[in-house]
Amino acid sequence: MSIFIPEKHWWRDPLDKDEKVWLAIALTTSIVLTLAMPWWHVTQKQNPSSEYYKIKPETFDAATDRFIQEFGEKDESGAIKQEGGIDVVAPPAGDIFVRGQQFKWSPVLKLKKGAAYRIHLSSIDVLHGFSVQPINMNFEAVPGYDYVLKVTPTTSGVFNIVCNEFCGIGHHTMVGRIYVD
Amino acid sequence: MEAVFRTCPVTGLKVERNAETLVMFNAVTSIVFLLVGGLLALLLLLTRWQAVHLLPADFFYRLLTLHGIAMLVAWIVFFEMAVLYFASAILLNTRLSVPYLAWGQYGLMVIGAAITAVTILLGKADVMFTSYVPLQAHHMYYFGIILFAVGAILGVCVFFATLGAARAEKTYVGSVPLVTFGAIAAAIIALLTLAHGAIVFIPTWLWALGIIPMMDPEVYRVLFWGFGHSTQQINVAAMISCWYLLGTLTVGSVPVSEKFSRSAFTLYVLFICIASEHHLLVDPGISTAHKEWNTGYFMHLAVLASMMHAFSVPAAVEVAQRKKGYTKGLFEWLKRAPWGDPGFSSMVFSVVGFGFLGGITGVIYGTEQLNIIVHNTLRVPGHFHATVVIGTTMAFMGITYYVLPLIFRREVMFPGIAKLQPYVFGIGMFVFSTAMMFVGGFGIPRRIWDITGAEAPFPVAYGPTADLALAVMAVGGLLAIVGGGMYILVAVATVAIGKKINR
């Protein structure tokens, strides 16, 4: 009985065949699962990035502003176009910036299919969740860290960036946008 | 306080009054928190169900924070304290050592939980259960959690002191019973976990008071999950002890191999605490090699332990049933099992729900590449409602049907409702958790008040199938809330007005 003192020498009692077989199955499963991750990491193309840099939130903020000024879509008067109150940027392939803050993702990005981008993702206040819908790809935006995601869009269309890390009472109003054509 | 004993007529165990009283107080308090958390669950469910969308945004976030604290922390840890006192003093036929300290445990945990709950309800701590910095709560929120944790540490100390006293006073010879061994595993994990809790919450409290600067957000995340996920491993070890206990109480099962089961518990102690980086797989700040090492090798040795228990718990039941003569065919033992005993049916739901629904999805979601499509979607709460609610909560519910007659010494009221309760709750939770994971597959985030983007610059749509799945989730959740209400009705009625059992 599992509520009473076990018989003496319980440690020396041999395992039954059933237990040994199950142990072998379970151990094999665990080993296969353990090896699957590095195996996929080496052989497959879709892995979380491990490239990141420490950065001060204000430095990242300024870098994003410079990025918006440099590549922002301008109207006839020379002002940067906006959508939903957020600046619109059409950058060439290369380094681009996505800034999370309560409660806004900026800028709105217009990307080209097949172009290779390095998304610098960070937050300038609290944690935010970078969730690209409907393709459902999710990453964490952490203040103080510049997280570099290497992305080459393969589908054209309209994508939302939904914040999926709770960031305050206005959390559900934090939706950004990416266009790919 | 002098030790006063009585002998339990069912198990023959010597039960000491202090231990018994403390088991009762902790168990009753845990059920009060279950009631609070359950009522909140109803409100939250009716808000997440976009077709109803009951609460306003600020209340949703506030009550979601409280739901996490009430259920994941208060209900479960209070019940675990009862399990620890039971597994030490009562199973080893001894008195509870340092009962004053045990009352300190109870008092601190009650005060701590109350302070945190009130701070949340006053709207000063809309930070969710995880309270990731730099999102800041009022300093009393962290202070309440620290008091609660100190109380829990005292409880674990009383547990170990009682074990030591029993050994010194020779109230038993040889090794401790398996259930106590499992409780020891839970208690060791608890100490390691609470140490992480102290490392993370004390500086955060001082930061909220303005005394020290903020911790690095990523360091906080690492440390928080060293506490937050390992806490769930206390639950796993306590829950599995309860499986063995329920196997013995319901069908008289004997562990098939003490060596096998105890080795599995040891694997938990060695590996499960460390493997918490599956929360951080899509985070910056940690290298790929470290993530894979941590969530691969370490986690899967703990998974191995769970698979061992998944074999030995049903095997023990089968052996016990076959000894009773149910030997026809492969499954007569299962068919003739006491399905009308709520202790037994709760255990079966707990084993199957934890293993298949919660455990397997947990292993899948903890894979680096797959985590990209899982992180912070409803898949995550779908997974842990299977482990913590179907697994841990149902195991504790099943134990309750035996704690009531054995410790409270009252006949279980409304036996018809008690018989049905695990089925209503279990089936409801199976539907709810499965649907929640399905909904998460559409990318719908967790912890969000509105999924349509109605107040956002851009509208968001997940499609009609997602809406249908949300409705299924709501129906399952409502069924589970009815089942939870049945449990609380039976437990409270029995404790308050149940017929006393004469010795």
Image: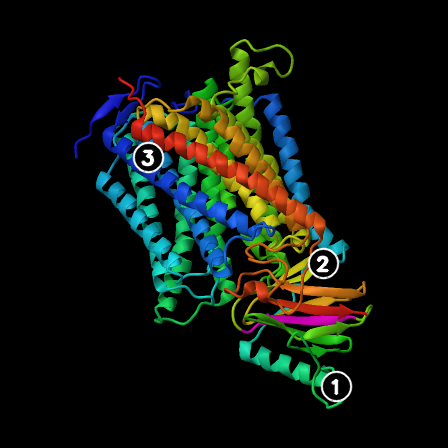
> On the rendered structure, is B157 left or right of B474?
left
Task: Tell me which amino acid carries mark 3.
Answer: Tyr
- Dot 1 crowding, Cα within 10 Å, few <14, some 14–19, many 20+: few
User: In front: mark 1 or mark 3?
Assistant: 1
Residue at disc 1, secondary structure: loop
Query: Which segment is the magenta one?
Result: A116-124
Above or below: residue A102 compared with residue B464: below
Task: Tell me which amino acid carries mark 2.
Answer: Pro
User: In front: mark 1 or mark 2?
Assistant: 1
Q: Residue furthest bottom?
A: A77
Residue B285 visible in the current orientation = no
Quadrant containing the C terminus of chain A is bottom right
Which is nearer the N-term, disc 1 or disc 2? 1
Q: Position of residue B17 (x, y in %)?
A: 24, 29
Q: Position of residue A179 (x, y in %)?
A: 75, 69
Q: CA distance from mark 3 to mark 2?
A: 50 Å
Query: What's the chain of the residue with tag 1?
Result: A
Circles 3 and 2, Cβ within 8 Å, touching? The answer is no
> On the rendered structure, is B428 left or right of B234?
right
Quadrant containing the N terminus of chain A is top left
- Dot 2 crowding, Cα within 10 Å, few <14, some 14–19, many 20+: some
Task: Tell me which amino acid carries mark 1.
Answer: Asp
Of the pair A107 and A137, the residue shown nearer to us: A107
- Write down the residue under mark 3: B85
Residue B429 visible in the current orientation = yes
Above or below: residue B88 compared with residue B388: above
- At 46% from the left and 20% from the top, the residue drawn is B250
User: In front: mark 3 or mark 2?
Assistant: 2
Q: Which mark is residue A75?
A: 1
- At 37% from the left and 53% from the top, the residue drawn is B117
Circles 1 and 3, Cβ within 8 Å, touching? The answer is no
